[in-house]
Structures are given as C-alpha cells and as structure tokens.
C-alpha cells in the first residue's frame, strides 16, 4: 500500500485506560472484553442488517447520481462498521453531530433516507428536525461541527443531564483549528463528548500520512483525556468501545477520542477521480477487510448466520433502496420563495418585503 | 426604577445583569469575562453574582467561543458571547457566516440560533493595530444575521436586552470609544426594536446618517451648523441589518439631501448601500448626490494619525456643504 499508515492501535506507553484495554494490538476487541461486555447474537445480527441496508443505500445513491437524479453523492462504502457501530452504541436520549458522510448514522437514527437525498438533489439545504431525531444537520465546512457538539455537551452538563454527545468527522478534519479548539474546550469543560474520527485515510487526494504526523488517537492525551484506535472495519469492536466511551461520558468522566481506522473504498464524491492519486492495488487489501464480510464471519463463528437471514436482509435492503429512490423522485421542487423562509425565526419586515417582490416578479413572469 | 447617570459600559453591564436575573437560560462567556469582568469591565461583577456556571471564562479561541454558543443555543440556552476586540472576531468568521447565520435555514426552521455575539468595535482610542476595526459590513452582508449598534447608554441597554430576547443570531457591535459616554437613565428600560432607526435630532436642510461611534460626531456637527443657520437632521441607524429605510426615506423626503458617516472605509461601506437605496427610492426627491464620509481604503492608521482619517464634525459639515451647492 503506497500510502499505508502504521495501523497499530496504540503507541503511547504508560497506564492503559480501560477502554483502550478492551482492544488488542490490532484494535480488535479482545476475547475477554467480548465476554465481559457481551453483544447478543440478535444485536450483532441487527448491526449486520443495518450495515447491509446502509451499503445498499450507498449503492443506490451512487446509481441515482450516475442517472442524473442527484447533483452529487459522497459514497461511504467502507464506513459501515464505524457509522452503524457508533450510532447504535449511543442511547436514543444521546445526541449525534454528524459530518457530511455520516449517512448511515442518519439511517440508524430513523431519518427517511429519501428525504435526506433532497439535499443532494438540490431541493433544500436540510431535511430533518434535529430535535426529533437527536441528530444535528450535516455540516459541509470540514470540522466546523465539532465545536457545536462540544457546546451542546457543555449544555447537557449545565442541565445536569446524563446525555452523551457523539461527533463524527474524518481524519482531514483533525487538521482544522476547529478540531483542536473543540478538543481543548472539551478537555477544559469536561464535556460529555465522544469524538469519533472515521480515519478513512484519504482527504480527497491527500493520504493520512500527509495529513497527520503520528497517531490521531494519541492526540487526546494532549488535551487531557484518553483516546484509542479501534479497527474501524469491525462493527463489534467499534460498537463496544463507543458504548463504553459514551457510558463514561454520561457518568461525568469527560470526553473520549476514538479513531476508527478504515478506508474510503470509493471516490471522495462523484466529482472526484481517485485514479489520479491511488491504484486498485492500494484499495485491494481494504476490500478484503470488508465490514459486512467481517460481521458475517463473526456471526458464522457464533453459529448465528444462515442463508435465510442473509436473504431476508438483502430483500429488506433492496426494498429500502427502492423506497428511497421513489421518495426522492416524488419530492417536488419547493416553491422558489421558500428560500426566504427560515432565514430568521423572526424575519425583519425588510426581508418579508423582499420576498413579496420576488414572488410578484415570478407571477408577472408567469403571466407573460 | 431609579434615575442615575450611567456610562455605556455600565448600561451594557446592567442589561447583562438583568437578562441573567430574569432568564436562567442566559449565559455570558468569553475571554476574561469572569473574574476580571472583561477588558472593558462590561461583565464586571456578573460572575460573582451569578456564579461560574453562568458567567465563565473560556480558552482563547474565538471560533469555538462562537461555535459553542451555537451548540448551547441548540440546547436551549441563551448565550451571550464576547469577542474581546473587533479584529479578534475574525477567527470566528467561518462559524458565524457558515454555521450560525445558516443553521435556522439548514434545519428548516427547527433550530433557532438564538445567541448574541458582542464585539467592541471602532477606533479613536489610541490603540495599537487590530484594536480599532470596523467590521460591520462583513456581518451586515451575511444573510441570517441581525446587526445592531448603539450610540448611547440608553440604547445600549435597550438594544442588548432586545438582542438577548430575539430568537435569531445578533451581532452586537459596541462602539468602544463611547464606553465612557454618560447619560441619565431610568433603569430598567424596555427593549428596543432591532430593526428601527431613530431620529437623533430633527432638522430640515440635510440628513446626516450615522451609527455607533459617529452619531455623537454628527450631533456635534449639527450643533455647529445650527449656529450658522443650517438645520441638520441626524439619523442614528441603530440597526445595520436590516436597514430601516422607512425612517431614512421619511427624513430625506423632507431634507432632500443626505450625508452618510461611518468610521469604516468609504469603499463598499454601509454608505454605499444607503446611497444606492436613497438614489433608487428617492431619485425624484434628491436635490444632490448622497455624500459619504468615512475612512480611506487603507488598513486602520496608527493612533498618532487616526484622527485625520476618522470622520469629524468639519468633514461632515464640508460634505453637507457639497450637497447644498446643488
């Protein structure tokens, strides 16, 4: 692998924190940890089911873009374990602040994927009520959602709530000032935040080695709290460490940084051409670490896998993909005057007048 | 209610105090606002009275001061964040323009970014570089923000009270050279509307449009002009976004002449928008081109020469004279 980075989970010496201690040297849950904090067969099958649906929706998103129905698609293949594992590890009362690629997290939270696609079709800049799903909007400027999560979590502490806040971002985001500032605030205010870095090793064309010197997970120590690197292709490992970090945060023990090491199998977005900066040979070892295959292998090892389950899941995934497509295609283009709505909660008279002028202009044009 | 003479700094302090006392969701934070009471002492005594949970110092990171304000607003708090100086608000620019101003739109109206960012601004205090900026047009140009600036202690109280109660993000620009201006007030005052200008002085021969630090200068010019038999009307904008064009138009309809005054550079300043709007809306009424008085298209000058760049009464009166030559 031309730009492979050191994939060992942990470099720092000294006392291991109990969450990092759940993982072996490859960032995979130890057998002992698996025994101590069991995830039932049924739970693991559910994680597989959600990953399979997510993968199918990602494929459908790509298809829709290729067919001209979406302006853009940001594929997340390779991220299924990190996103599904982390989202499902949070309680329904917890909050999630996603980055723009965290589509599978939104699906896990029950947001209608067909509605979300409206963002990529150019219908609206948002698609859900964050309070309904406890899921903040996708944020485009890289890293800038991270301090929002910290502020929200500071508010949870002020309200004496036992709520944890998960925030997702890629490894490129760890170069932004917002990430460093947010990590610092989280440490200083002991905010109940689980920082989830989905290190897919590519920020468009820039490999992780050119993005970060050293390990991202080690950087938590500089902000006064622990971190761990987990195998981001293994849903059971991600689920277990995020659940432990969230429990820790809810107990008032402060923030935690999890670096989920995975790989962006597809292009950055449909506008990107990865053949300009990497080869199939670079990608191949990570295809072999496919999150769904690994989860299926775990289920087989537990004797909790059968063809009927696999077929049922595939059937559900196809149904969800079809429903997503038809929801998207049935959604009307909102009236252009909607652009004036929701600029303000209490819009000034001046803006209302501007809207009225815009509408009468449209009507005059239509009348011609 | 009691009558007392208060400075603008004290009026702002009292507005924050009363907001903290009346609504337990109000939070005040920023750099040095706690124990120190802020470098201008606007938050003096607030932490001692309301505690470190509600009035607190943050790390020195303006972007995240703004961003955590957004997160806290989303959680249902009413954050009032302080930027220590005008130029130090620039690190928070992405958070303000890309997230705070657009969060209500992005959530289809579900989340109100109900927060206030207080920024001391303007020059004329003999400061070193980066402490005398006039950043108002950056913010006024960004849809989704309300931008207000008081010129008097009473307005400082009324506008800040209204800004904290308003459901939208408000950029609250405090003319730092006026922090020590005094006014006799009956406090507490009712909140002021966030979208209305005020007629600071009535007149009939020309309208001088000013805001924040230049209102006092405009009033001084009007006083001088009155001695020379020229009657100037002075409009204090109070709100820079939105612009109260009704009040401006009513005045210019009467005087037929307008001069816009600000400390910011003339180029692409508030005066450009106001002149364009007046020309468009009152083309038949105007007796002369709208004049603008402001700074040069240079970085803010060193303090020993700043007074030559800032609008003063003479430059305002010269501009008035130019409008009266037509």
Image (tube, rainbow, N blue to C red):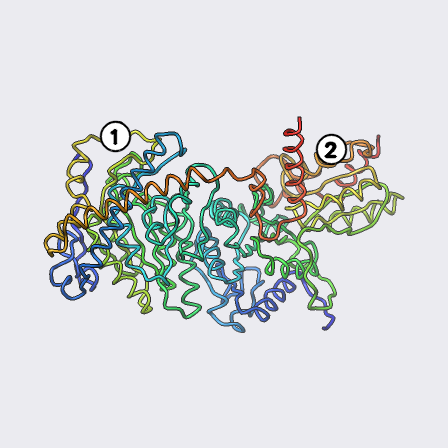
Q: Residue furthest right?
A: B229
SS for dot 2? helix
Quadrant in the rendering for residue B46: bottom right
Q: Which residue is mark 2?
A: B280
Please provide percent x and percent y for residue B207.
Answer: 79, 42
Q: Is residue B161 left or right of residue A184?
A: right
Q: CA distance from mark 2 to mark 1?
A: 54 Å
Quadrant in the rendering for residue B178: bottom right
Q: Quadrant of the N terminus of chain A?
A: top left
Please provide percent x and percent y for residue A156.
Answer: 41, 65
How many numbered marks, from 0 up? 2
Both labels 2 and 1 in a single chain: no
Please provide percent x and percent y for residue B230.
Answer: 87, 43
SS for dot 1? loop
User: As rendered, which of B219 and B66 lies closer to the eye?
Assistant: B66
Q: Which residue is mark 1?
A: A277
Q: Label 2 marks which chain's residue? A: B
Q: Is residue B112 left or right of residue A251?
A: right
Q: Residue furthest top?
A: A368
Residue at image location 72% in from the left, 69% down from the top: B4
Specify few, some or many for label 1: CA neighbours under 10 Å numbering under 14, 14-19, or 20 or more. Answer: few
Q: Quadrant of the C terminus of chain A?
A: top right
User: As rendered, which of B290 and B163 lies closer to the eye?
Assistant: B163
Please provide percent x and percent y for residue A64.
Answer: 36, 34
Labelled disc at residue B257: none
User: As rendered, which of A319 and A90 lies closer to the eye?
Assistant: A319
Q: Is residue A246 left or right of residue B2?
A: left
Q: Label 1 marks which chain's residue? A: A
Dots 2 and 1: beta carbons under 8 Å? no
């Amino acid at each position: 692998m031309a730009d492979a980075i050191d994939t060992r989970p942990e470099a720092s010496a000294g006392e291991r924190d109990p969450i990092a201690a759940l993982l072996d040297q490859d960032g995979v849950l130890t057998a002992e940890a698996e025994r101590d904090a069991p995830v039932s067969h049924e739970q693991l099958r559910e994680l597989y089911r959600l990953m399979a649906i997510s993968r199918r929706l990602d494929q459908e998103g790509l298809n829709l873009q290729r067919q001209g129905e979406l302006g853009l698609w940001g594929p997340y293949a390779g991220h299924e374990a990190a996103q599904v594992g982390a989202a499902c590890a949070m309680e329904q009362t917890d909050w999630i602040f996603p980055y723009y690629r965290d589509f599978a997290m939104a699906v896990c939270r029950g947001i209608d994927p067909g509605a979300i696609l409206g963002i990529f079709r150019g219908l609206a800049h948002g698609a859900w009520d964050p309070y309904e799903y406890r899921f903040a909007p996708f944020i485009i400027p890289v890293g800038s959602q991270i301090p929002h999560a910290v502020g929200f979590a500071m508010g949870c502490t002020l309200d004496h709530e036992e709520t944890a806040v998960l925030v997702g971002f890629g490894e490129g985001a760890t170069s932004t000032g917002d990430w460093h500032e947010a990590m610092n605030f989280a440490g200083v205010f002991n905010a109940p935040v689980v920082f989830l870095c989905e290190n897919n090793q590519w920020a468009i064309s820039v490999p992780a080695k050119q993005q970060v010197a050293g390990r991202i997970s080690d950087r938590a120590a500089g902000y006064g709290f622990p971190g761990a690197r987990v195998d981001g292709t293994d849903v059971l490992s991600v689920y277990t460490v995020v659940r432990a970090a969230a429990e820790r945060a809810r107990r008032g023990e402060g923030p935690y940084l999890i670096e989920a090491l995975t790989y962006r199998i597809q292009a950055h977005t449909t506008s990107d051409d990865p053949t300009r900066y990497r080869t199939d040979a670079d990608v191949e070892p990570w295809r072999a670490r496919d999150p769904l295959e690994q989860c299926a292998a775990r289920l087989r090892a537990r004797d909790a896998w059968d063809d009927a389950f696999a077929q049922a899941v595939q059937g559900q995934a196809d149904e969800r993909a079809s429903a997503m497509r038809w929801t998207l295609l049935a959604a009307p283009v909102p009236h252009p005057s909607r652009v004036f709505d929701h600029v303000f909660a209490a819009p000034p008279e001046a803006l209302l007048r501007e809207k009225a002028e815009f509408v009468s202009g449209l009507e005059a044009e239509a009348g011609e | 209610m009691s009558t007392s003479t208060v400075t603008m700094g004290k009026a702002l302090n009292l507005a924050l105090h009363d907001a903290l006392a009346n609504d337990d969701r109000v939070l005040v934070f920023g750099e040095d606002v706690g124990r120190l009471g802020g470098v201008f002492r606007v938050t003096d005594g607030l932490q001692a009275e309301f505690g470190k949970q509600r009035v607190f110092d943050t790390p020195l990171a303006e972007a995240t001061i703004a961003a955590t304000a957004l997160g806290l607003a989303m959680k249902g708090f009413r954050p009032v964040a302080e930027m220590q100086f005008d130029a130090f608000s620039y690190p928070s620019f992405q958070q303000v323009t890309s997230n705070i101003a657009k969060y209500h739109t992005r959530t289809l109206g579900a989340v109100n970014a109900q927060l206030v960012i207080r920024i001391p601004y303007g020059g004329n205090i003999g400061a070193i570089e980066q402490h005398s900026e006039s950043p108002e047009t950056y913010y006024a140009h960004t849809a989704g923000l309300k931008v207000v600036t008081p010129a008097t202690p009473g307005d400082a109280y009324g506008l800040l009270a209204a800004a904290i109660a308003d459901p939208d993000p408000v950029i609250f620009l405090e003319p730092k050279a006026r922090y020590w201006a005094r006014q006799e007030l009956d406090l507490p005052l009712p909140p002021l509307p966030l979208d209305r200008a005020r007629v600071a002085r009535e007149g009939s021969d020309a309208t001088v449009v000013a805001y924040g630090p230049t209102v006092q200068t405009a009033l001084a010019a009007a006083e001088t002009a009155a001695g020379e038999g020229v009657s100037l009307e002075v409009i204090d904008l109070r709100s820079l976004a939105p612009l109260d064009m009704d009040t401006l138009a009513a005045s210019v309809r009467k005087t037929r002449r307008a001069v816009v005054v600000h400390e910011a550079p003339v180029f692409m300043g508030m005066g450009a928008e106001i002149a364009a709007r007046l020309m468009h809306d009152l083309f038949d009424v105007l007796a002369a081109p709208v004049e603008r008085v402001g700074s040069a298209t240079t970085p803010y000058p060193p303090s020993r020469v700043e007074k030559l760049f800032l609008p003063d009464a003479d430059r305002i009166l010269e501009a008035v004279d130019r409008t009266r030559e037509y």
